[in-house]
Image: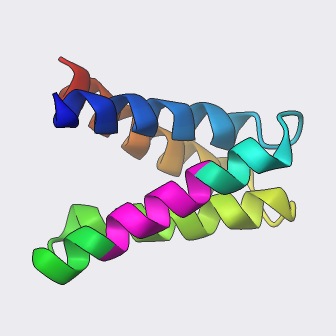
Amino acid sequence: MIIKLLGFADLLAVIALIGSSFLPQSLVIIMAIYLIIKGLYFVIIGGVIPNILDLISGIYLLLAILNFTHWIPTLIVSLYLLQKAAISLF
């Protein structure tokens, strides 16, 4: 059950990243904080690469609020989070 919830939250993070220019900033900030906290938590207990990538994705989502983005890294981060969400949900 918790894995499906985390997968749904990752899906919301993808939506927040793609729509960061027209969605409410509070939603984007909440999803960025979610990714950073999840990344930090799992890095502390496990430290494997996907958890570090969650942390980096959260930081990139914060940069998206400030318009420090480009379409190529946005696509890469979105595809990474989307595949994590798909694996968690199915």
Q: Report the residue that reaches farthest toward the left.
A: 46
Q: Residue 68 is drawn in which quadrant?
A: bottom right
Q: Residue 86 is drawn in which quadrant?
A: top left
Q: Report the residue that reaches farthest toward the front.
A: 1
Majority secondary structure in the magenta region: helix
Q: Does the magenta stretch include residue 23?
A: no
Quadrant occupied by the C terminus: top left
Residue 60, position in %: x, y? 62, 64
The residue that appears at 38% across and 45% down in the rendered structure is: 80
The answer to whether residue 79 is left or right of residue 72 is left
Q: In this view, does 16 lie above or below 31?
A: above
The residue that appears at 54% across and 41% down in the rendered structure is: 13
Query: Magenta segment range?
Result: 31-40
Q: Does the magenta stretch include residue 38?
A: yes
The residue that appears at 81% across and 58% down in the rendered structure is: 65
Q: In this view, does 58 lie above or below 75?
A: below
